[in-house]
Amino acid sequence: MDVADLLPPDRVIAKLPAGDKPTLLADLARRAAAATGLPQPAILQALKAREALGSTGVGSGVAIPHARIPGIECFFGLFTRLERRIDYDAVDEQPVDLVFLLLVPPHAANEHLQALACISRRLRDQAVSARLRRTTDAETLYATLVGRDGP
């Protein structure tokens, strides 16, 4: 599995404004609902429930909010580079600016873990995260995420 399997080019957002974590999660849930046809409150509730178990801020300015969502048939990915870093209660207590939303079908087990590992490896690569932070357009963000931006 690689990031291209989880993220189409049209689900990359450059410079998303977000004042705080709750606002960000609500915006991500709204966007996911619009794309999937699933109810925004259900998506937001699932994301909040997962955050209650422990922050999905994995460190180094990266967050991977994720949840199992009844009614979703395949993985749903959305990536954004935030306009500015926000407090996310990350494990390293550093603010977050690179966010990859992952919604998972309830039946996905090993695939769920593989997807999270794939995303985490890519975003925590220091060279990749540095390129993402320098990038201002969605097309280049996507190319960097899926490894089509050169060596």
Image (spheres, rainbow, N blue to C red):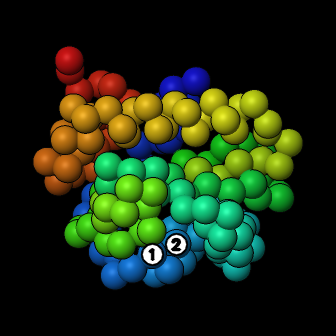
- Asked if residue 1 lies left or right of residue 125, the reply is right
Up/down of 19 relative to 69, above or below = below
Q: Which residue is mark 1?
A: 21
Farthest residue, direction front: 92
- Asked if residue 139 lies left or right of residue 117, the reply is left
Q: Quadrant of the C terminus?
A: top left
The quarter of the displayed image where residue 129 is located? top left
- The residue lying at 30 percent from left, 25 percent from top is 148
Query: Are there few (<14), some (14-19), or many (20+) residues within 10 Å of tag 1?
Result: some
The quarter of the displayed image where residue 123 is located? top left
Q: Which residue is mark 2?
A: 25
Asked whether residue 80 appears in the rendered view, the answer is no
Q: Nearer the viewer, mark 2 or mark 1?
A: 1
* Residues tagged 2 and 1 counted as in contact (Cβ below 8 A): yes
Which element carries disc 1, helix, strand or loop? helix
- The residue lying at 19 percent from left, 39 percent from top is 131
| Residue 49 % position (x, y) | 71, 70
Amino acid type, label 2? Leu
- Asked if residue 46 lies left or right of residue 28, the reply is right
User: 143 or 10, which lies in front?
Assistant: 143
The CA distance from mark 2 to mark 1 is 6 Å
| Residue 18 % position (x, y) | 35, 76
